[in-house]
Amino acid sequence: MAKKVLAIDPGTTESAYVCFYDGVPVEYAKKPNEELMHILAMFTADEMAIEMIASYGMPVGKEVFETCVWIGRFIQEWYSLYKPYAFVYRKDVKMFLCGTPRAKDSNIRQALIDLYPRTGGGKTPQIGTKGKPGPLYGMSKDMWAALGVAHTYVNKTK
């Protein structure tokens, strides 16, 4: 039985999410963190996967620590619903989708696009057009990172 996963790409003030079921993103958006935290209970997902920050010995700024605080708040809210969660590291997303830790966001985006059928219109039918949308229609910016988290998590927990 396929599980429904809520995948989050956290940020300092806004976070992107993808609700992922049976290999398909069924809902996705980017919301202010406060709003996302308050609507977590409304998601019918079975599990949550959230991108976690890893230290590679480099100095970091206050944005990294603010993001860590939000990761903790999201987990606390989700866990209060007695639902499981897991961390997914960016390095793991890069390795799973691209086979190299040196992959850039554009490589990850393309690898994700390549996973979906060419059912929409336009030059990238996996995304499609307004008149003929594909399965990834409306996906943008940080939502791609959340989709990468979803694919990595689901495929690593099979």
Image (cartoon, rainbow, N blue to C red):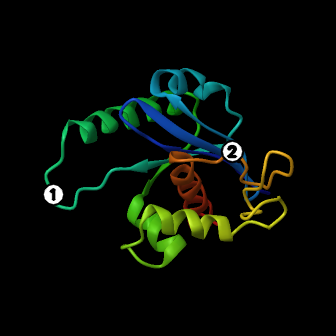
Residue 139 vertical placement versus 121 (above, below)? above
Residue 49 in view, yes or no: no
The image position of residue 136, as x and y in percent, is 71, 53
Viewer-side residue, 158 vs 140: 140
Q: Residue furthest front?
A: 123
Amino acid identity at mark 2: Gly
Q: Which residue shows up at 29% across the image and 55% down it? A: 54
Residue 87 in view, yes or no: yes
The image position of residue 79, as x and y in percent, is 51, 33
Q: Residue 99 carries which label?
A: none
Left or right of residue 42, residue 80 in this image: left
Left or right of residue 25, residue 112 in this image: left
> Which image quadrant: the N terminus?
bottom right
Viewer-side residue, 129 vs 117: 129
Count of all numbered marks drawn on residues in the image: 2
The image position of residue 51, as x and y in percent, is 44, 50
Residue 153 vertical placement versus 36 (above, below)? below
Q: Which residue shows up at 67% across the image and 26% down it? A: 42
Identify the element where label 2 is drawn: loop
Q: Which class describes the residues within 10 Å of circle 1: few (<14), some (14-19), or many (20+)?
A: few
The tag earlier along the polypeptide, 2 or 1, is 1
- Determine the CA span between mark 2 and mark 1: 35 Å
- Residue where numbered disc 1 is placed: 58
Q: Which mark is residue 138?
A: 2
> Which image quadrant: the C terminus?
bottom right
Identify the element where label 1 is drawn: loop
Viewer-side residue, 79 vs 113: 113
Amino acid identity at mark 1: Met
- CB-based contact (under 8 Å), mark 2 and mark 1: no
Viewer-side residue, 150 vs 135: 135
The image position of residue 89, as x and y in percent, is 40, 58
